[in-house]
Protein backbone atom coordinates (compact mmCIF):
# COMPACT_ATOMS: atom_id res chain seq x y z
CA UNK A 1 0.00 0.00 0.00
CA UNK A 2 1.20 3.48 -0.86
CA UNK A 3 0.08 6.58 1.04
CA UNK A 4 -0.26 10.07 -0.48
CA UNK A 5 1.50 11.68 2.48
CA UNK A 6 1.63 15.26 1.20
CA UNK A 7 0.48 17.37 -1.73
CA UNK A 8 1.13 20.78 -3.30
CA UNK A 9 -0.72 22.13 -6.33
CA UNK A 10 1.04 25.25 -7.58
CA UNK A 11 -0.71 27.99 -9.49
CA UNK A 12 -1.51 27.10 -13.11
CA UNK A 13 -1.27 29.93 -15.59
CA UNK A 14 1.17 32.02 -17.52
CA UNK A 15 3.91 32.99 -15.09
CA UNK A 16 5.51 36.22 -16.21
CA UNK A 17 6.59 37.34 -12.76
CA UNK A 18 10.39 37.23 -13.04
CA UNK A 19 10.54 33.81 -11.40
CA UNK A 20 12.03 30.61 -12.85
CA UNK A 21 10.42 27.18 -12.97
CA UNK A 22 13.23 26.08 -10.66
CA UNK A 23 11.94 28.58 -8.08
CA UNK A 24 8.40 27.19 -8.40
CA UNK A 25 9.65 23.63 -7.90
CA UNK A 26 11.48 24.46 -4.66
CA UNK A 27 8.43 26.34 -3.31
CA UNK A 28 5.98 23.53 -4.09
CA UNK A 29 8.31 20.83 -2.77
CA UNK A 30 8.52 22.56 0.61
CA UNK A 31 4.76 23.06 0.69
CA UNK A 32 4.28 19.32 0.09
CA UNK A 33 6.87 18.44 2.75
CA UNK A 34 5.04 20.56 5.34
CA UNK A 35 1.76 18.94 4.27
CA UNK A 36 3.35 15.49 4.70
CA UNK A 37 4.83 16.42 8.08
CA UNK A 38 8.24 15.30 6.80
CA UNK A 39 11.70 16.87 6.54
CA UNK A 40 14.01 17.09 3.52
CA UNK A 41 16.21 14.34 4.94
CA UNK A 42 13.27 11.91 4.96
CA UNK A 43 13.08 11.85 1.15
CA UNK A 44 15.04 8.98 -0.42
CA UNK A 45 13.57 9.03 -3.92
CA UNK A 46 12.79 11.69 -6.53
CA UNK A 47 10.77 11.26 -9.71
CA UNK A 48 10.56 14.27 -12.01
CA UNK A 49 8.02 14.62 -14.81
CA UNK A 50 8.13 17.09 -17.65
CA UNK A 51 6.95 16.60 -21.18
CA UNK A 52 9.62 18.13 -23.37
CA UNK A 53 13.16 19.41 -23.08
CA UNK A 54 12.21 21.66 -25.99
CA UNK A 55 9.96 23.68 -23.66
CA UNK A 56 12.24 23.83 -20.60
CA UNK A 57 15.54 23.84 -22.52
CA UNK A 58 16.80 21.57 -19.77
CA UNK A 59 18.08 18.08 -20.48
CA UNK A 60 18.40 15.66 -17.56
CA UNK A 61 16.32 17.92 -15.29
CA UNK A 62 16.03 15.38 -12.43
CA UNK A 63 19.75 15.69 -11.69
CA UNK A 64 19.62 19.48 -11.27
CA UNK A 65 16.31 19.37 -9.38
CA UNK A 66 17.71 16.88 -6.84
CA UNK A 67 20.37 19.47 -6.04
CA UNK A 68 17.86 22.34 -5.98
CA UNK A 69 15.70 20.44 -3.49
CA UNK A 70 18.59 19.46 -1.24
CA UNK A 71 17.94 15.73 -1.70
CA UNK A 72 21.35 14.85 -3.19
CA UNK A 73 21.85 11.17 -2.59
CA UNK A 74 18.23 10.26 -3.33
CA UNK A 75 17.61 7.93 -6.26
CA UNK A 76 16.36 10.21 -9.03
CA UNK A 77 14.90 9.83 -12.49
CA UNK A 78 12.76 11.64 -15.01
CA UNK A 79 9.63 10.12 -16.55
CA UNK A 80 7.90 11.16 -19.77
CA UNK A 81 4.77 10.03 -21.57
CA UNK A 82 3.24 13.07 -23.27
CA UNK A 83 0.20 14.42 -21.44
CA UNK A 84 0.41 11.52 -18.99
CA UNK A 85 3.97 12.36 -17.91
CA UNK A 86 3.03 13.44 -14.38
CA UNK A 87 0.68 10.53 -13.88
CA UNK A 88 3.32 8.03 -15.02
CA UNK A 89 5.76 9.59 -12.54
CA UNK A 90 3.31 8.80 -9.73
CA UNK A 91 3.11 5.21 -10.98
CA UNK A 92 6.91 4.97 -11.10
CA UNK A 93 7.24 6.34 -7.56
CA UNK A 94 4.54 4.04 -6.17
CA UNK A 95 6.09 1.04 -7.91
CA UNK A 96 9.51 1.91 -6.45
CA UNK A 97 7.98 1.94 -2.97
CA UNK A 98 6.06 -1.30 -3.53
CA UNK A 99 9.24 -2.95 -4.82
CA UNK A 100 11.10 -1.92 -1.68
CA UNK A 101 13.42 0.44 -3.55
CA UNK A 102 12.42 3.59 -1.66
CA UNK A 103 10.45 4.62 1.41
CA UNK A 104 9.41 8.24 0.81
CA UNK A 105 9.46 9.56 -2.74
CA UNK A 106 8.87 13.12 -3.94
CA UNK A 107 7.07 13.27 -7.29
CA UNK A 108 7.68 16.61 -8.94
CA UNK A 109 5.96 17.63 -12.19
CA UNK A 110 6.51 20.88 -13.99
CA UNK A 111 5.93 22.75 -17.23
CA UNK A 112 7.09 26.22 -18.25
CA UNK A 113 5.98 26.24 -21.90
CA UNK A 114 3.45 29.04 -21.44
CA UNK A 115 6.02 31.65 -20.44
CA UNK A 116 9.40 30.38 -21.67
CA UNK A 117 8.71 29.98 -25.38
CA UNK A 118 6.16 31.35 -27.84
CA UNK A 119 2.77 29.68 -28.28
CA UNK A 120 3.36 29.15 -32.01
CA UNK A 121 6.49 27.13 -31.19
CA UNK A 122 4.59 25.12 -28.58
CA UNK A 123 1.79 24.34 -31.02
CA UNK A 124 4.25 23.29 -33.70
CA UNK A 125 6.19 21.06 -31.30
CA UNK A 126 2.96 19.49 -30.01
CA UNK A 127 2.22 18.50 -33.60
CA UNK A 128 5.10 16.04 -33.25
CA UNK A 129 3.32 14.20 -30.40
CA UNK A 130 1.49 11.79 -32.68
CA UNK A 131 2.96 9.85 -35.64
CA UNK A 132 6.18 11.85 -35.81
CA UNK A 133 6.94 13.94 -38.90
CA UNK A 134 4.22 12.36 -41.04
CA UNK A 135 1.36 13.80 -38.96
CA UNK A 136 3.31 16.90 -37.90
CA UNK A 137 3.73 17.82 -41.58
CA UNK A 138 -0.06 17.95 -42.03
CA UNK A 139 -0.05 20.88 -39.56
CA UNK A 140 -3.50 19.92 -38.30
CA UNK A 141 -2.22 19.83 -34.73
CA UNK A 142 -3.69 18.29 -31.61
CA UNK A 143 -6.97 20.19 -32.04
CA UNK A 144 -7.51 18.78 -35.53
CA UNK A 145 -6.86 15.21 -34.38
CA UNK A 146 -9.15 15.48 -31.36
CA UNK A 147 -11.78 17.04 -33.63
CA UNK A 148 -11.65 14.08 -36.03
CA UNK A 149 -11.91 11.69 -33.10
CA UNK A 150 -14.95 13.34 -31.51
CA UNK A 151 -16.62 13.67 -34.93
CA UNK A 152 -16.26 9.92 -35.32
CA UNK A 153 -18.12 9.50 -32.01
CA UNK A 154 -20.70 12.14 -32.97
CA UNK A 155 -21.34 10.15 -36.16
CA UNK A 156 -22.27 7.21 -33.90
CA UNK A 157 -24.83 9.47 -32.14
CA UNK A 158 -25.25 10.50 -28.52
CA UNK A 159 -23.07 13.66 -28.53
CA UNK A 160 -24.05 17.07 -29.91
CA UNK A 161 -22.01 20.29 -30.27
CA UNK A 162 -24.02 21.75 -27.35
CA UNK A 163 -22.94 18.85 -25.14
CA UNK A 164 -19.29 19.74 -25.79
CA UNK A 165 -19.99 23.34 -24.78
CA UNK A 166 -21.73 22.12 -21.62
CA UNK A 167 -18.53 20.31 -20.55
CA UNK A 168 -16.63 23.58 -20.94
CA UNK A 169 -19.26 25.50 -18.94
CA UNK A 170 -19.00 22.97 -16.09
CA UNK A 171 -15.20 22.82 -15.95
CA UNK A 172 -14.48 26.54 -16.34
CA UNK A 173 -17.20 27.08 -13.72
CA UNK A 174 -15.63 24.68 -11.20
CA UNK A 175 -12.34 26.52 -11.76
CA UNK A 176 -13.86 29.72 -10.33
CA UNK A 177 -13.64 28.09 -6.87
CA UNK A 178 -10.09 26.77 -7.37
CA UNK A 179 -7.47 29.45 -6.56
CA UNK A 180 -4.82 27.48 -8.51
CA UNK A 181 -6.83 27.58 -11.77
CA UNK A 182 -5.62 29.18 -15.01
CA UNK A 183 -9.02 29.85 -16.63
CA UNK A 184 -11.79 30.35 -14.05
CA UNK A 185 -14.83 31.54 -16.02
CA UNK A 186 -18.58 31.73 -15.52
CA UNK A 187 -19.96 30.94 -18.96
CA UNK A 188 -23.11 29.98 -20.85
CA UNK A 189 -23.32 27.37 -23.61
CA UNK A 190 -23.93 30.17 -26.12
CA UNK A 191 -20.81 32.04 -24.99
CA UNK A 192 -18.67 28.91 -25.38
CA UNK A 193 -20.09 28.29 -28.86
CA UNK A 194 -19.45 31.92 -29.82
CA UNK A 195 -15.73 31.64 -29.02
CA UNK A 196 -13.48 31.30 -32.10
CA UNK A 197 -13.65 28.00 -33.97
CA UNK A 198 -10.29 26.21 -33.61
CA UNK A 199 -11.03 22.86 -35.31
CA UNK A 200 -14.67 22.07 -35.99
CA UNK A 201 -16.52 21.19 -33.77
CA UNK A 202 -14.10 22.63 -31.19
CA UNK A 203 -14.18 26.28 -30.15
CA UNK A 204 -11.41 27.97 -28.18
CA UNK A 205 -13.18 27.59 -24.82
CA UNK A 206 -13.48 23.83 -25.47
CA UNK A 207 -9.69 23.49 -25.83
CA UNK A 208 -7.38 23.38 -22.79
CA UNK A 209 -4.81 26.14 -22.48
CA UNK A 210 -1.05 25.60 -22.35
CA UNK A 211 -0.14 26.41 -18.74
CA UNK A 212 2.93 26.83 -16.61
CA UNK A 213 2.57 24.78 -13.44
CA UNK A 214 4.26 22.72 -10.76
CA UNK A 215 2.62 19.97 -8.72
CA UNK A 216 4.28 17.83 -6.08
CA UNK A 217 3.14 14.83 -4.10
CA UNK A 218 5.07 12.85 -1.57
CA UNK A 219 4.35 9.13 -1.50
CA UNK A 220 5.31 6.86 1.36
CA UNK A 221 5.04 3.21 2.26
CA UNK A 222 2.28 2.53 4.81
CA UNK A 223 4.75 2.23 7.71
CA UNK A 224 6.89 5.15 6.48
CA UNK A 225 4.24 7.89 6.58
CA UNK A 226 4.28 9.97 9.78
CA UNK A 227 1.70 9.05 12.42
CA UNK A 228 0.11 12.47 11.90
CA UNK A 229 -0.79 11.42 8.32
CA UNK A 230 -2.54 8.16 9.19
CA UNK A 231 -5.74 9.60 7.68
CA UNK A 232 -4.08 10.26 4.34
CA UNK A 233 -5.59 8.83 1.16
CA UNK A 234 -3.83 5.87 -0.42
CA UNK A 235 -3.29 4.46 -3.88
CA UNK A 236 -5.05 1.12 -4.25
CA UNK A 237 -4.91 0.50 -8.00
CA UNK A 238 -2.86 1.58 -10.99
CA UNK A 239 -3.28 0.66 -14.65
CA UNK A 240 -1.62 1.72 -17.88
CA UNK A 241 -2.07 0.77 -21.51
CA UNK A 242 -1.72 2.03 -25.06
CA UNK A 243 -3.79 2.34 -28.21
CA UNK A 244 -2.69 2.55 -31.86
CA UNK A 245 -0.95 5.91 -32.19
CA UNK A 246 -2.64 6.70 -35.52
CA UNK A 247 -6.35 7.41 -35.28
CA UNK A 248 -6.99 5.65 -38.59
CA UNK A 249 -5.52 2.41 -37.25
CA UNK A 250 -8.26 2.19 -34.61
CA UNK A 251 -11.41 0.19 -35.21
CA UNK A 252 -13.44 3.03 -33.63
CA UNK A 253 -11.53 6.34 -33.94
CA UNK A 254 -14.06 7.98 -31.62
CA UNK A 255 -13.52 5.58 -28.72
CA UNK A 256 -10.63 5.36 -26.28
CA UNK A 257 -9.98 1.61 -26.21
CA UNK A 258 -6.46 1.94 -24.74
CA UNK A 259 -7.93 3.88 -21.84
CA UNK A 260 -10.55 1.19 -21.31
CA UNK A 261 -7.74 -1.36 -20.91
CA UNK A 262 -5.83 0.89 -18.49
CA UNK A 263 -8.98 1.35 -16.41
CA UNK A 264 -9.74 -2.38 -16.33
CA UNK A 265 -6.24 -3.03 -15.00
CA UNK A 266 -6.60 -0.31 -12.34
CA UNK A 267 -10.02 -1.57 -11.21
CA UNK A 268 -8.73 -5.13 -11.13
CA UNK A 269 -5.75 -4.09 -8.96
CA UNK A 270 -8.02 -2.05 -6.67
CA UNK A 271 -10.56 -4.86 -6.57
CA UNK A 272 -13.52 -2.50 -6.89
CA UNK A 273 -16.20 -1.90 -9.53
CA UNK A 274 -16.47 1.40 -11.49
CA UNK A 275 -19.84 2.09 -9.86
CA UNK A 276 -18.11 2.69 -6.50
CA UNK A 277 -16.08 5.67 -7.77
CA UNK A 278 -17.40 8.80 -6.06
CA UNK A 279 -15.16 11.49 -7.57
CA UNK A 280 -12.99 11.63 -10.70
CA UNK A 281 -10.42 13.84 -12.38
CA UNK A 282 -10.66 13.05 -16.10
CA UNK A 283 -8.44 14.12 -19.00
CA UNK A 284 -10.35 16.92 -20.78
CA UNK A 285 -7.63 18.33 -23.06
CA UNK A 286 -10.62 19.00 -25.34
CA UNK A 287 -14.20 19.07 -24.08
CA UNK A 288 -15.23 15.90 -25.92
CA UNK A 289 -12.36 13.89 -24.51
CA UNK A 290 -14.02 14.13 -21.07
CA UNK A 291 -17.06 12.33 -22.49
CA UNK A 292 -14.99 9.83 -24.48
CA UNK A 293 -12.93 9.14 -21.34
CA UNK A 294 -15.93 8.69 -19.03
CA UNK A 295 -17.23 5.99 -21.37
CA UNK A 296 -13.85 4.28 -21.70
CA UNK A 297 -13.31 4.33 -17.93
CA UNK A 298 -16.62 2.58 -17.32
CA UNK A 299 -17.96 5.62 -15.44
CA UNK A 300 -20.72 5.99 -18.07
CA UNK A 301 -22.44 3.46 -20.33
CA UNK A 302 -21.46 3.77 -24.02
CA UNK A 303 -23.04 6.79 -25.78
CA UNK A 304 -24.70 7.94 -22.53
CA UNK A 305 -22.05 10.30 -21.09
CA UNK A 306 -23.40 13.45 -22.74
CA UNK A 307 -26.94 12.81 -21.50
CA UNK A 308 -25.73 12.11 -17.97
CA UNK A 309 -23.54 15.21 -18.01
CA UNK A 310 -26.35 17.48 -19.18
CA UNK A 311 -28.53 15.97 -16.42
CA UNK A 312 -26.01 17.16 -13.82
CA UNK A 313 -24.60 13.75 -12.89
CA UNK A 314 -21.00 15.04 -13.13
CA UNK A 315 -21.58 18.50 -11.58
CA UNK A 316 -19.80 19.49 -8.39
CA UNK A 317 -22.97 18.63 -6.47
CA UNK A 318 -23.84 15.64 -8.66
CA UNK A 319 -23.62 11.92 -7.98
CA UNK A 320 -20.12 11.67 -9.45
CA UNK A 321 -18.32 15.04 -9.56
CA UNK A 322 -15.93 15.06 -12.54
CA UNK A 323 -13.11 17.59 -12.70
CA UNK A 324 -13.89 19.50 -9.51
CA UNK A 325 -10.52 21.21 -10.09
CA UNK A 326 -11.78 22.55 -13.41
CA UNK A 327 -9.80 19.91 -15.29
CA UNK A 328 -7.41 20.86 -18.04
CA UNK A 329 -10.01 23.22 -19.50
CA UNK A 330 -10.40 25.26 -16.31
CA UNK A 331 -7.45 24.52 -14.03
CA UNK A 332 -5.04 24.35 -16.97
CA UNK A 333 -2.95 22.01 -19.06
CA UNK A 334 0.62 21.24 -17.99
CA UNK A 335 1.54 17.64 -18.90
CA UNK A 336 4.31 17.20 -16.33
CA UNK A 337 2.13 18.60 -13.54
CA UNK A 338 -1.37 17.51 -14.61
CA UNK A 339 -1.51 13.88 -13.46
CA UNK A 340 0.17 14.79 -10.17
CA UNK A 341 -2.33 17.61 -9.60
CA UNK A 342 -5.22 15.24 -10.39
CA UNK A 343 -4.05 12.75 -7.79
CA UNK A 344 -3.32 15.52 -5.27
CA UNK A 345 -6.83 16.89 -5.84
CA UNK A 346 -8.44 13.50 -5.26
CA UNK A 347 -6.33 12.85 -2.14
CA UNK A 348 -7.57 16.13 -0.66
CA UNK A 349 -11.19 15.45 -1.65
CA UNK A 350 -11.07 11.98 -0.07
CA UNK A 351 -9.64 13.52 3.11
CA UNK A 352 -12.43 16.13 3.06
CA UNK A 353 -10.08 19.11 2.75
CA UNK A 354 -10.40 20.30 -0.86
CA UNK A 355 -11.36 23.92 -1.63
CA UNK A 356 -14.56 25.18 0.06
CA UNK A 357 -17.34 25.24 -2.53
CA UNK A 358 -15.83 22.28 -4.37
CA UNK A 359 -15.48 19.76 -1.53
CA UNK A 360 -18.49 17.40 -1.77
CA UNK A 361 -20.69 17.46 1.32
CA UNK A 362 -20.82 13.68 1.65
CA UNK A 363 -17.32 12.21 2.02
CA UNK A 364 -16.31 10.03 -0.93
CA UNK A 365 -14.47 6.77 -0.43
CA UNK A 366 -12.98 6.14 -3.89
CA UNK A 367 -11.52 8.52 -6.47
CA UNK A 368 -10.21 7.92 -9.98
CA UNK A 369 -7.55 9.88 -11.88
CA UNK A 370 -7.31 9.52 -15.66
CA UNK A 371 -4.57 11.02 -17.82
CA UNK A 372 -3.31 10.33 -21.33
CA UNK A 373 -0.67 11.24 -23.88
CA UNK A 374 -1.26 11.46 -27.62
CA UNK A 375 -4.96 11.07 -28.32
CA UNK A 376 -5.66 8.55 -25.55
CA UNK A 377 -2.70 6.67 -27.02
CA UNK A 378 -0.68 6.22 -23.83
CA UNK A 379 -3.07 5.98 -20.89
CA UNK A 380 -2.65 5.96 -17.12
CA UNK A 381 -5.36 5.42 -14.49
CA UNK A 382 -5.03 5.48 -10.70
CA UNK A 383 -7.65 4.65 -8.07
CA UNK A 384 -7.38 6.14 -4.59
CA UNK A 385 -9.18 5.30 -1.38
CA UNK A 386 -9.77 7.53 1.60
CA UNK A 387 -8.91 6.34 5.11
CA UNK A 388 -11.82 4.59 6.81
CA UNK B 1 14.86 41.56 -17.63
CA UNK B 2 14.40 38.09 -19.10
CA UNK B 3 17.42 36.36 -20.56
CA UNK B 4 17.03 35.19 -24.16
CA UNK B 5 18.57 32.11 -25.73
CA UNK B 6 17.78 31.45 -29.37
CA UNK B 7 18.32 28.07 -30.99
CA UNK B 8 18.27 27.35 -34.69
CA UNK B 9 17.66 23.65 -35.17
CA UNK B 10 17.79 21.69 -38.41
CA UNK B 11 16.86 18.03 -38.35
CA UNK B 12 17.82 15.57 -41.07
CA UNK B 13 15.14 12.86 -41.04
CA UNK B 14 15.07 9.66 -43.05
CA UNK B 15 11.90 7.85 -44.12
CA UNK B 16 13.74 4.52 -43.74
CA UNK B 17 11.49 1.55 -44.58
CA UNK B 18 8.71 3.98 -45.47
CA UNK B 19 10.62 5.27 -48.54
CA UNK B 20 8.36 3.63 -51.20
CA UNK B 21 5.28 5.05 -49.46
CA UNK B 22 6.84 8.51 -49.15
CA UNK B 23 7.90 8.51 -52.81
CA UNK B 24 4.30 7.56 -53.66
CA UNK B 25 2.92 10.57 -51.76
CA UNK B 26 5.18 12.87 -53.79
CA UNK B 27 3.90 11.27 -57.01
CA UNK B 28 0.22 11.16 -55.98
CA UNK B 29 0.13 7.37 -55.71
CA UNK B 30 -1.28 5.45 -52.76
CA UNK B 31 1.54 2.97 -52.09
CA UNK B 32 0.41 0.58 -49.36
CA UNK B 33 2.15 -2.13 -47.37
CA UNK B 34 0.82 -5.64 -47.65
CA UNK B 35 1.82 -8.27 -45.12
CA UNK B 36 3.34 -11.39 -46.68
CA UNK B 37 1.98 -13.51 -43.87
CA UNK B 38 -1.65 -12.48 -43.33
CA UNK B 39 -2.29 -10.19 -46.31
CA UNK B 40 -3.35 -7.16 -44.25
CA UNK B 41 -3.05 -3.94 -46.28
CA UNK B 42 -2.06 -0.77 -44.43
CA UNK B 43 -2.11 2.78 -45.80
CA UNK B 44 -0.38 4.54 -44.13
CA UNK B 45 1.92 1.56 -43.69
CA UNK B 46 2.53 -0.34 -40.46
CA UNK B 47 6.13 -1.11 -39.56
CA UNK B 48 4.96 -4.31 -37.89
CA UNK B 49 1.77 -6.05 -38.98
CA UNK B 50 -1.04 -6.82 -36.51
CA UNK B 51 -0.02 -10.45 -36.96
CA UNK B 52 3.46 -9.60 -35.69
CA UNK B 53 5.38 -9.95 -38.97
CA UNK B 54 7.69 -7.44 -40.62
CA UNK B 55 8.06 -8.98 -44.09
CA UNK B 56 5.89 -7.26 -46.66
CA UNK B 57 5.41 -6.18 -50.25
CA UNK B 58 4.42 -2.75 -51.56
CA UNK B 59 1.34 -2.37 -53.75
CA UNK B 60 -0.43 0.52 -55.45
CA UNK B 61 -4.02 1.14 -54.33
CA UNK B 62 -6.53 2.79 -56.67
CA UNK B 63 -6.01 6.09 -54.85
CA UNK B 64 -9.74 6.55 -54.23
CA UNK B 65 -11.29 6.51 -50.79
CA UNK B 66 -14.23 7.52 -48.62
CA UNK B 67 -14.13 10.50 -46.24
CA UNK B 68 -15.01 9.19 -42.76
CA UNK B 69 -14.61 12.41 -40.74
CA UNK B 70 -13.60 15.94 -41.64
CA UNK B 71 -12.54 19.07 -39.74
CA UNK B 72 -11.04 22.49 -40.35
CA UNK B 73 -7.83 23.21 -38.49
CA UNK B 74 -5.22 25.88 -38.97
CA UNK B 75 -7.17 27.27 -41.91
CA UNK B 76 -7.21 24.01 -43.84
CA UNK B 77 -9.44 20.98 -44.27
CA UNK B 78 -8.27 17.70 -42.77
CA UNK B 79 -9.97 14.34 -43.06
CA UNK B 80 -9.80 10.72 -42.07
CA UNK B 81 -10.03 8.75 -45.34
CA UNK B 82 -10.47 5.01 -45.85
CA UNK B 83 -8.75 4.14 -49.15
CA UNK B 84 -10.10 1.34 -51.32
CA UNK B 85 -8.23 -1.86 -50.55
CA UNK B 86 -6.81 -0.65 -47.20
CA UNK B 87 -7.63 -2.19 -43.85
CA UNK B 88 -6.98 1.08 -41.97
CA UNK B 89 -7.67 4.79 -42.59
CA UNK B 90 -5.37 7.70 -43.30
CA UNK B 91 -5.14 11.30 -42.13
CA UNK B 92 -5.11 13.59 -45.13
CA UNK B 93 -5.12 17.26 -46.06
CA UNK B 94 -8.07 18.08 -48.32
CA UNK B 95 -7.30 20.52 -51.11
CA UNK B 96 -9.30 22.16 -53.87
CA UNK B 97 -12.61 22.79 -52.20
CA UNK B 98 -15.22 21.62 -49.75
CA UNK B 99 -15.48 18.14 -48.32
CA UNK B 100 -18.29 16.25 -46.62
CA UNK B 101 -18.30 13.04 -44.65
CA UNK B 102 -19.29 10.12 -46.89
CA UNK B 103 -17.88 11.78 -50.03
CA UNK B 104 -15.36 10.09 -52.30
CA UNK B 105 -11.83 11.55 -52.36
CA UNK B 106 -8.80 10.92 -54.57
CA UNK B 107 -5.11 11.21 -53.77
CA UNK B 108 -3.15 14.00 -55.51
CA UNK B 109 0.60 14.63 -55.63
CA UNK B 110 1.85 16.27 -52.44
CA UNK B 111 2.36 20.01 -52.74
CA UNK B 112 5.26 19.93 -50.25
CA UNK B 113 8.73 20.94 -51.35
CA UNK B 114 11.35 18.33 -52.31
CA UNK B 115 13.13 18.52 -48.94
CA UNK B 116 9.93 18.54 -46.83
CA UNK B 117 8.25 15.52 -45.29
CA UNK B 118 5.46 14.99 -47.87
CA UNK B 119 1.86 14.99 -46.67
CA UNK B 120 -0.99 12.85 -47.88
CA UNK B 121 -3.23 15.17 -49.89
CA UNK B 122 -6.62 14.36 -51.35
CA UNK B 123 -9.34 16.14 -53.24
CA UNK B 124 -13.06 15.52 -53.50
CA UNK B 125 -13.13 17.06 -56.97
CA UNK B 126 -12.37 14.94 -60.01
CA UNK B 127 -8.72 14.92 -60.99
CA UNK B 128 -9.48 16.68 -64.27
CA UNK B 129 -11.19 19.52 -62.36
CA UNK B 130 -8.08 19.95 -60.25
CA UNK B 131 -5.81 19.90 -63.30
CA UNK B 132 -7.90 22.63 -64.99
CA UNK B 133 -7.41 24.99 -62.04
Image (spheres, helix red, strand yellow):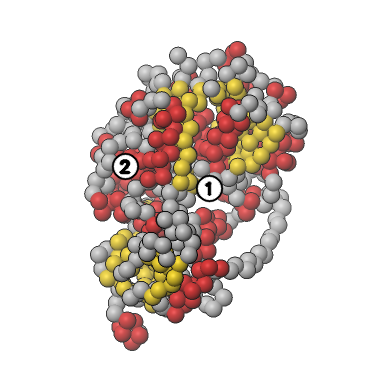
Q: Position of residue A86 (x, y in %)?
A: 55, 39
Question: Could you tell which of marks 2 and 1 lies nearer the N-terminus?
Answer: 1
Q: Secondary structure at mark 1?
A: loop
Chain under callout 2: A
Q: Taking A318 as reference, is A246 above or below it?
A: below
How many residues crowd mark 1 within 10 Å: few (<14), some (14–19), many (20+)?
Answer: many
Whether callout 2 and callout 1 share a subunit is answered yes
Q: Position of residue A199 (x, y in %)?
A: 38, 58
For the C terminus of chain A, the quadrant is: top left
**B132, A277: nearer the viewer:** A277
Which residue: 28% across, 37% down?
A301
**Total numbered labels:** 2
Q: Residue furthest bottom?
A: B132
Q: Quadrant of residue B16?
A: bottom right
Q: Quadrant of residue A21?
A: top right
Q: Secondary structure at mark 2?
A: helix
Q: Taking A32 as reference, is B16 above or below it?
A: below
Q: Quadrant of residue A213?
A: top right
**A197, B22: nearer the viewer:** B22
Residue A383 visible in the picture? no
**A319, B87: nearer the viewer:** B87
Circle 1 residue:
A82
Which residue: 57% across, 31% down?
A95
Which residue: 35% across, 44% down?
A292
Q: Position of residue A252 (x, y in %)?
A: 32, 52
Chain under callout 1: A
Q: Taking B73 as reference, is B117 above or below it?
A: below
Q: Position of residue A323 (x, y in %)?
A: 41, 35
Which residue: 37% across, 70% down?
B94
How many residues crowd mark 2 within 10 Å: few (<14), some (14–19), many (20+)?
Answer: many
Circle 2 residue:
A166
Amino acid sequence: MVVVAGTAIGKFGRRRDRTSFRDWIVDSFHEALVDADLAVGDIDGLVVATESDMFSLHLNPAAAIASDLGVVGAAARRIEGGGASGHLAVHAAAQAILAGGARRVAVVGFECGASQIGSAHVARLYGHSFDGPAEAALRIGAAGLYALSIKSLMNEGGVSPKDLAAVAVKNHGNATMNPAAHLPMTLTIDEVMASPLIAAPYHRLECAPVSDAVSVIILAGASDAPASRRRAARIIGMGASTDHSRLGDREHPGRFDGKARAAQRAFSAANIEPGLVGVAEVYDAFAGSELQSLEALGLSPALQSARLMVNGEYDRKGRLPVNLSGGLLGQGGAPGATGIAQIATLARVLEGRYWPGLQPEALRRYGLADTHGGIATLCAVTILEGAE
Amino acid sequence: MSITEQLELTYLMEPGMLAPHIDGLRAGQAVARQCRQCGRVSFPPDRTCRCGRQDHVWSNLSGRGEVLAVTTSGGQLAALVRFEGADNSALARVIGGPCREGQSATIVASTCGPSDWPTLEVTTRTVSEVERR
